[in-house]
Image (cartoon, grey):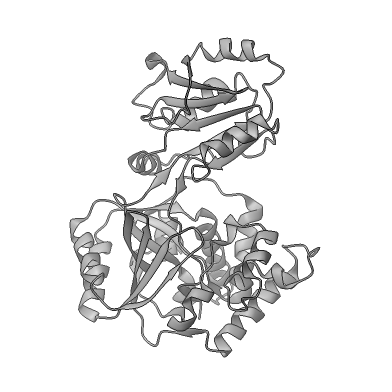
């Protein structure tokens, strides 16, 4: 599949809610809610997209979320929403303009389908490893409903011309807009003018690479489905592209992705502070410490906030991956002092997106559930792109993107 060069992105016949149902359909991404949370959120709303992305909510509470009946239920639910004309397919292939508004922050993106071949050719670049169980779940979900129902969030590098084209698309009539529980407005416009479609396609074909920001499991699953269908001579043009929303890199908002650890690895507080002072300068703070630049870390330990600053001689600016704040914390505190060698599987560490307040982190420690909390400076978009360009992989939980896309607003049917 990866031997030929395909169009990087293409327009497609999107499956969208009818405007009068869009607010009911819109749902958080499938992987930010537990089954119980999804059950509560969708209660009394038969058209919530959670009935497709988290279909176990329509079955007994003790059902295994990865059982065959769950995926079968997703298929039944999607067919019902199409039959009831809650969701409708566009008659012609087109792009969509997707605006996200969160407080004073706005970002304008393009809904398109992106080439699986170019994903395999590394023109669509990743920066994270995937977890097999989550990837398998998405493969089964895509196969069951014969559609990609969750978009991959991607970014494109600096391109004033694409920015200009998206600005033009932002003047088109609004198809619908919805507000989600996280106080984000999602605004969808149809880009069906052929000259604008052609210009967008042409400009993206000249882009050397685009980057996955959020959705590595979705893109990996799409590639596996495409490969399986290709091997079985069941491939279609649709199955060899995957649902994406592309934003300019300079509009993306990455916030801190913090760490909490359940114990000090049999060290006393005094011993722990002495050990970390070998790599970081350590000062107490009467206030919450929110890092203002790379190299700084806020730490909360036994009722006290600390301001940590990495010692300059330990940072090699030529080592992009090693100089990330998440890497430095692992290399000088988490692994050698706290004994956490496997961030993906060690049960003593947990990860907390910066959307949670400092008070919430502090509460985890004060309650005794966790022993120490670390607040990090957010990974920067240029760092993400640089790591991806070098073919390296970031440590787990290095980036938290906000605002997040909603599921259900645009889906890609694989016919």
- 206 up-or-down from 261: above or below: below
| Image position, residue 193 (x, y; %) | 24, 80
- 34 up-or-down from 329: above or below: below
- 396 up-or-down from 101: above or below: above
- Residue appearing at x 53%, y 84% in the figure: 86
| Image position, residue 55 (x, y; %) | 67, 70
- In front of the other: 59 or 147: 59
- In front of the other: 391 or 394: 394
- Residue appearing at x 22%, y 55% in the figure: 159
**Residue 354 horizontal side relative to residue 48, left or right:** left
- 397 up-or-down from 283: above or below: below
**Residue 95 horizontal side relative to residue 193, left or right:** right
The mark total stands at: 0
**Residue 190 horizontal side relative to residue 36, left or right:** left
**Residue 189 horizontal side relative to residue 58, left or right:** left
| Image position, residue 376 (x, y; %) | 47, 32
- Residue appearing at x 47%, y 15% in the figure: 283
| Image position, residue 76 (x, y; %) | 66, 81
Residue 212 visible in the displayed image: yes
């Amino acid at each position: 599949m990866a031997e030929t060069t395909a169009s990087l992105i293409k327009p497609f016949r999107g499956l969208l809610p009818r405007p009068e149902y869009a607010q009911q359909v819109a749902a958080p991404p499938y992987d930010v809610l537990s089954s119980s949370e999804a059950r509560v959120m969708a209660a009394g709303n038969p058209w919530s997209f959670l009935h497709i992305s988290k279909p176990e909510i329509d079955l007994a509470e003790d059902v295994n979320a990865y059982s065959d009946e769950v995926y079968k239920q997703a298929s039944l639910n999607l067919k019902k929403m199409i039959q009831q004309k809650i969701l409708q397919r566009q008659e012609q292939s087109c792009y969509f303009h997707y605006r996200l508004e969160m407080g004073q922050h706005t970002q304008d993106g393009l809904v398109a389908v992106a080439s699986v071949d170019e994903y395999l050719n590394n023109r669509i670049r990743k920066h994270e490893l995937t977890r097999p169980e989550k990837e398998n779940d998405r493969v089964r979900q895509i196969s069951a409903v014969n559609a990609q129902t969750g978009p991959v969030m991607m970014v494109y590098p600096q391109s004033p011309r694409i920015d200009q084209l998206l600005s033009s698309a932002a003047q088109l009539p609004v198809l619908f807009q919805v507000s989600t529980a996280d106080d984000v407005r999602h605004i969808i416009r149809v880009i069906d003018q052929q000259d604008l479609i052609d210009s967008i396609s042409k400009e993206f074909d000249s882009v050397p690479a685009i980057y996955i920001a959020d959705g590595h499991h979705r893109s990996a699953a799409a590639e596996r489905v495409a490969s399986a269908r290709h091997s079985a001579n069941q491939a279609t043009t649709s199955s060899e592209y995957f649902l994406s929303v592309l934003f300019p890199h300079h509009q993306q908002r990455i916030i801190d992705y913090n760490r909490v650890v359940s114990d000090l690895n049999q060290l006393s507080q005094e011993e722990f502070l002495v050990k970390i002072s070998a790599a970081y300068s350590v000062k107490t703070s009467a206030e919450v410490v929110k890092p203002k630049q790379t190299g700084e870390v806020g730490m909360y330990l036994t009722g006290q906030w600390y301001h940590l600053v990495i010692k300059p001689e330990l940072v090699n600016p030529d080592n992009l991956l090693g100089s990330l704040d998440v890497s430095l914390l692992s290399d000088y505190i988490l692994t050698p002092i706290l004994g956490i060698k496997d961030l993906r599987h060690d049960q003593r560490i947990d990860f907390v997106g910066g959307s949670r307040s400092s008070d919430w982190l502090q509460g985890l420690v004060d309650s005794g559930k966790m022993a120490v909390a670390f607040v990090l400076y957010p990974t920067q978009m240029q760092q993400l792109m640089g790591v991806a360009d070098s073919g390296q992989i970031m440590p787990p939980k290095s980036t938290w993107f906000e605002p997040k896309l909603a599921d259900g607003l645009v889906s890609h049917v694989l016919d």
